[in-house]
Image (cartoon, rainbow, N blue to C red):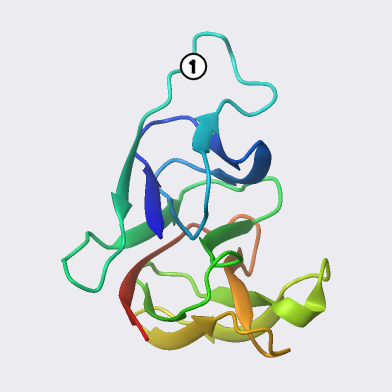
């Protein structure tokens, strides 16, 4: 499992084995479980002069890793952001997600059995609140494959921190 953090000023796309997974916006991180080649690429419409910067780290129970984070100051095209993608992971993964901003956001999940359906809402995380959750993939219908955050209002600035607490 890896954490990819966009430390630049332009969004970039994360590509695994030639499949685009998601766009990682500036000041956002993505935790991803994958096998194969991981690349970043410019999204459609990026200027030829755009430069991309990022940091990645391997997530492990045996060493400390900097927290993942997300922070948006302006409306995005949809107001939704993928922060954890465990589609290629068989472990039970434990996360803590903390709202470090002033506006609430919705935490949603995609589950194994839902296929291409829209994410289902888990909880609204209010200012100063945190939530611990278990994400795993064992083939059961309730398994969580992806964790998304959603703005409640498109103009809201949301920010938070999330920590990988370990796996079983």
Report the side of 106 relative to 70 (left or right): right
Residue drawn at x 70%, y 45% as measured from the top left: 77
Q: Among all residues in the image, which is located at the extreme top?
A: 48
> Where is residue 149 shown, x and y percent of the image?
56, 67
Q: Secondary structure at mark 1?
A: loop
Rendered position, 74 above or below 146: above
Residue drawn at x 57%, y 25% as measured from the top left: 42
Report the side of 74 relative to 97 (left or right): right
Q: Among all residues in the image, which is located at the extreme front?
A: 36
Residue drawn at x 49%, y 60% as measured from the top left: 33
Can see residue 11? no
Q: Quadrant of residue 122?
A: bottom right
Rendered position, 53 above or below 27: above
> Where is residue 54 shown, x and y percent of the image?
36, 36
Which one is in front, 69 or 56? 56
Residue drawn at x 59%, y 79% as measured from the top left: 137
> Where is residue 86 shown, x and y percent of the image?
54, 67
Report the side of 120 relative to 132 (left or right): right
Q: Quadrant of the N terminus?
A: bottom left
Mark 1 surroundings: few (<14), some (14-19) or many (≥20) residues within 10 A: few
Can see residue 20? yes
Q: Among all residues in the image, which is located at the extreme left?
A: 63
Residue that label 1 marks: 50
Q: Quadrant of the C terminus?
A: bottom left
Q: Quadrant of residue 41?
A: top right
Q: How many marks?
A: 1
Which one is in front, 156 or 129? 129
> Where is residue 159 shown, x and y percent of the image?
41, 61
């Amino acid at each position: 499992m890896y954490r990819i953090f966009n430390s630049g000023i332009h969004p970039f796309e994360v590509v695994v084995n030639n499949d685009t997974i998601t766009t990682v916006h500036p000041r956002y991180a993505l935790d991803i479980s994958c096998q194969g080649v991981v690349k970043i690429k410019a999204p459609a419409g990026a200027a030829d002069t755009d430069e991309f910067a990022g940091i990645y780290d391997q997530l492990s129970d045996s060493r400390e890793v900097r927290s993942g984070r997300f922070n948006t100051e302006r409306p995005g095209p949809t107001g939704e952001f993928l922060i954890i993608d465990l589609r290629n992971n068989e472990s039970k993964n434990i996360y803590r997600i903390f709202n470090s901003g002033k506006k609430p956001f919705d935490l949603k999940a995609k589950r194994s059995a839902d296929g291409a359906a829209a994410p289902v809402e888990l909880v609204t995380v209010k200012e100063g609140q945190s939530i611990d959750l278990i994400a795993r993939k064992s083939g059961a219908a309730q398994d969580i494959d992806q964790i998304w955050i959603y703005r409640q209002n498109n103009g809201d600035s949301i920010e938070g921190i999330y920590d990988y607490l370990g796996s079983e």
